[in-house]
Image (cartoon, grey):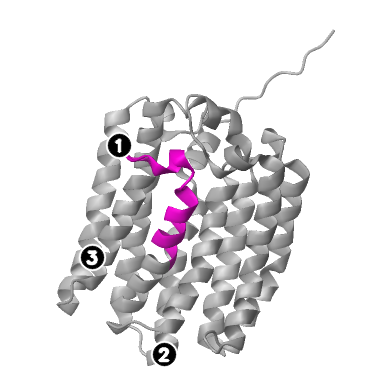
Amino acid sequence: MTTTPIIEPSKKKLWLAAIKPPMYSVAIMPIIAGTAIAFRETHRLNLSIFLTFLISAILILAWENLSNDVFDSETGIDKNKTHSVVNLTGNKPLIFGLSNFCLGLGILGIFAIAWWQQDWTVLEIILLCCALGYSYQGPPFRLGYQGLGEIICFFAFGPLAITAAYYSQTQSFSATMLGGSVFIGISTSIILFCSHFHQVEDDIAAGKRSPIVRLGTARGAKLLKWSTASLYVLTVLLIGLGIYPLGTLLVVLSLPFAIALTSHVQQYHDQPEKVSNCKFLAVNLHFFSGILFALGFLLF
């Protein structure tokens, strides 16, 4: 009788999974989209502000990812998560300190933008984003454990982040800016929604009432399909209302990514080991639909 050896992931793969480079699409896309909308309306681009905002957004997301690992280690929900940064290092204080260092640098970049413009609106909006980000996993709130993560994600990375990026270029607001924020907010929330399918048992054990715990994986897969379809329905609707330019129909080219995501989850929703990669399929959809969405404002 022979047994199949268990192949442990390499340290390099675990670190890549822990750092999650593709997930930083979540940080950059609102800045790109908000800036694209601003450029279409003003025909001006302040490149220094754009790049400063982009770097700051990446640093702030690094804070959120690292601090969430720290907060999750306190509840025990990550005890089976081999690619948790805290589990990999075994040094929670170090990771917490590093996360706060990233936050400080990120906020410093946003402060610089506000200082250059002598207008503190952008800083105020980003501080609100950070407060929402903390409330997601941070004590005593831990709103993500109540199933509110997707709502927090929608507002933080949609209306608030897009508004901040747009305002940093124009120091004004617009209906198009708000319309664009809904698209990015939904596509970002889809990523978080997909991250729950493979960890239902761990969530239940830790008392986390994620949407998938509440709905079950089968109903969650159906909701994912409708949520993904809403991106395209929303685009057509807002083009018809004159809020989006006709060029945003380019997002239709991202349909293969949407189909790949929803089909995969529909087939494997109740098989954790096979559905665990669906959040990265959601990142693909978020990135390519977001780029096409932004190009629609720039090119047509």
In magenta, the rendered stretch is: 137-158
Query: Label 1: how many residues lie within 10 Å, few (<14), some (14-19) or many (20+)?
Result: few
**Label 1 residue SS:** loop
Image coords of residue 193 (percent x, y): 56, 49
Image coords of residue 147 (percent x, y): 49, 44
Q: Is residue 173 visible?
A: yes
Quadrant occupied by the N terminus? top right
Mark 3, residue position: 124
Between tags 1 and 2, which lies in front? 1
Query: Label 3: how many residues lie within 10 Å, few (<14), some (14-19) or many (20+)?
Result: some
| Rendered residue at 40%/45% (across/down) | 65
Q: Is residue 258 left or right of residue 71?
A: right
Q: Is residue 140 magenta?
A: yes
How many angstroms separate mark 1 from mark 3 (CA)?
Answer: 23 Å
Q: Please say if 119 is above or below 134.
A: below
Mark 2, residue position: 41
Between tags 2 and 3, which lies in front? 3
Between tags 1 and 3, which lies in front? 1
* Residue furthest top in the image: 1
N-term mark: 1 or 2: 2
| Rendered residue at 45%/38% (across/down) | 145
How many angstroms separate mark 1 from mark 2 (CA)?
Answer: 42 Å
Three-letter code for the amino acid on which mark 3 is drawn: Glu
**Picture quarter containing residue 248?**
bottom right
Query: Label 2: how many residues lie within 10 Å, few (<14), some (14-19) or many (20+)?
Result: some
Q: Is residue 127 left or right of residue 197?
A: left
Where residue 140 is drawn, which disc sits there?
Answer: 1
Q: Please say if 39 is above or below 50.
A: below
